[in-house]
Image (cartoon, grey):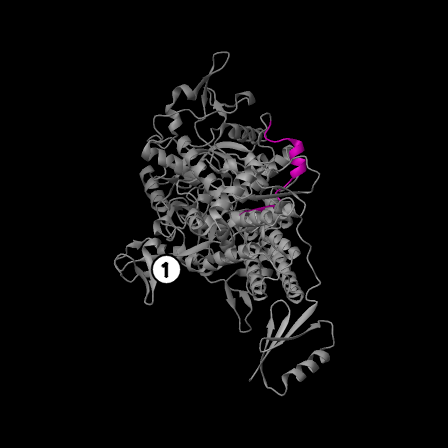
Amino acid sequence: MDQKYIKEKWQKYWEDSSAFVANNNSQKPKYYILDMFPYPSGNGLHVGHAVGYIGSDIIARKKRMSGFNVLHPMGWDAFGLPAEQFAIKTGISPQESTKTNCDNFRRQLKNMGLSYDWRREISTCEESYYKWTQFLFLKLYDRGLIYESEQYVWWCEELKTVLANEEVIDGKSERGDYPCIRKPLKQWTIKITKYAERLLEDLNDLDWPESIKKMQREWIGKSTGTDIKFDIVGVDNSLKVFTTKPETIYGVNAVIISPEHPNLSDLMISLSREEQISRLNKVNSASVESIVGVHTGSVAIHPMTKEKLPVLISNYVLSSYGQGAVMCVPVHDDRDRRLSQSMGLPSTKVIETDDQGEELLVNSSFLTGLTPLIARNSVTKFIEENELGEVNTRYRLHDWIFSRQRYWGEPIPLYKDKSGKIIPASLNELPITLPKVESYLPTKDGKSPLLRETEWVIKKTENGEKLTRVTDTMPSWAGSCWYYLRFMDPKNDVEPFSEAALEYWKEVDLYIGGAAHATMHLLYARFWHKVLYDIGLVSFKEPFRKLFNQGLVTADAFQSETGRIIPVDETEVTVDGYVSKKTGEKLEVFHTKMSKSLLNVVTPETVINKYGVDTFRLYMMFIGPLGKSKKWQYNSIKGCERLVNRIYSIYSIPSNKLDSGKVELIDNAWKIAFNRVDRSFKNFNFNTAVAAFMEFINVVEKNENNISPSTQRKLLITLYPFAPHICCELWTLSRNLGHVYEQKWPQNSSQIIKRIKLMINGKFISFHQKEEDEETMLSELRESLEGKKIKRIIHIYGGGINVLTDE
């Protein structure tokens, strides 16, 4: 069997015949299945990326056979920092490198036999696409959801750009793991906080993994607590401090504010400018793991005891939490304890556990002796009655910093006149396209390289007025906020999408992608969609009805005794473990995710060229449930290769006269196998489906290929979503009408195993109806045993019993 020939033949046929084109006007029920479209990096795809794409393809193919009009598109999330970094290093424009990368990704995906509707292909960096991203940006601006303000942001010196909070993990950039610092810059920001409650509440209506919903809930961070006023000595205004545990008020030894608190300058006014800068630098340069605090020079008054408390600045207080100010209660908070110890502050315990294990307030005036819950209610009432504060609801979610001082992104369609007034671009100007630039490096003060292109920056109006273009670009998240809508109507050049297309396809029925996007893309897309819903551009409240996260594919990596990473293809396994092929040196093996730096990346084409595309597809599903992490191992792919060859052999060897008994055994075995395959689509545990195919082929071979033409057809129909190339080929070779992918998905059979085959020591004795009285079978068994002692009873897959005796 020439799998390469079969692959090329059928992939060309599918493309030429438009086999997987979705129709916006179909009378069939719709099913919209979408992969999170990839960023087309220069590294290309590895098998870890492929697992989700193959899984979604299997589902899409099965849905078409089940009578659905399936929309299964693919495109490119093409704006992003790597292309710009590459341009800085090589001089190759992002436009050129991105096109090359997209071509490579497309070739890799087509090579896997994925049934995408390529006529709907989109790329977020194409002018015909980002014209509408700019259009939708202006819709948000018109709603008053976009504003410019100076605020502290994450700045990455290595990347020369501002990053959103979601793009920084433990003080380092998510992309590249570079150090980041906080610095004040003017930024364009979107009021996502205005939608915090809706984003939280509507999670309840989504068929999403609970872990993802939990991550979004925690990121939005709704909490009900109390804003307590702390008067500041020598200042008219009080400092509002938010706490969810007002019952610990008598344990407060300081007030701590964020280094980005809006009243910071007023609170540090007693210090010289040099001292202010020095103290702030100490806090802002601290590592994420450390707890650093400095004094503002101001003193607060405890609202209950009237005691004087220091006002401190610390790096662990977030500007986005409450109003950027918290109470320091060292005995009952670890970070407060570490800060208090480092600054020599006193501490007072206010909660103790009594002999019965119940927590009670101590050292807390009128709250002493109360449980924490009762104390909380009591002190909250006291605070409100005495106008010392009020109950409030706060969110950890903060507004979304939407501008980047980079080249490779959608130009923000705004101008400023000479007075600084914001002027939105007119719709007939769109798209505002990126100019060619001499250098992709930001300016020395961190501003966009577009600022150097003066002819592009300055626009003259009809009346001769000069307008200055905003030179910031949008983040890479902008295009992915709405791409699922564009796929419904990708060739529309008069609007981003038509009402008719949206009303037919509506929300995505199944969205497949990684869990890493929980608090970024998935949250941003939900927010953007809700704004479009309020504007009236969409009629449904959420973009993705069901979300499924595919698991990671991990692999072994290898290291020599000197610490050098050894490429996977330079290793071999021996009785002593893995060794270097070149030197014979024993290697240390460690299990990790696939990474270019660890030299353990396996590409799809490498496997396909060696084993065939259908073998590759089957193996990617066989190594574990689609939603679980799984380990890539070359040595176990042979089983799937054998399965493909064995299936081909069944159809290539002509059947002589069939044995009716064996035919029925195989038919019964098929019913069991099909039901397992069919059930695998419930939770996408396709490893059980591949195992079912393997076990069924075992039964066929043990029964000398006595498989009926009807069961042969059912096997090909059911196997087709998993191994489409060989199934199309064998369907045609078997002279069946039409194509296998045009057939209806079989119905689940509940009538399994009509007869049971009885054998003794492998020798056939008789058939028995399953419904027969067990005594009849046992009677015949006793007669046939002739006094022999039973050692073991084996239940045979497909419906049989083999009794092993001592002779």
The spot of residue 766 in percent (x, y) is 67, 75
Residue closer to the observer: 259 or 383: 259
Amino acid under label 1?
A: Phe
Q: Residue 590 sits in which quadrant?
A: bottom left
Residue at the outermost bottom position: 787
Per the image, the residue denoted by label 1 is 590
131 lies above or below 364: above
Residue closer to the observer: 636 or 538: 636
Q: Is residue 185 visible?
A: no
Q: Is residue 705 left or right of residue 315?
A: right
Magenta highlight range: 495-513
The spot of residue 474 in percent (x, y) is 47, 33
The spot of residue 451 in percent (x, y) is 39, 25
- Dot 1 falls on a residue whose secondary structure is strand
Q: Residue 161 sits in which quadrant?
A: top left
Residue closer to the observer: 96 or 430: 96
Residue 79 on the magenta span: no
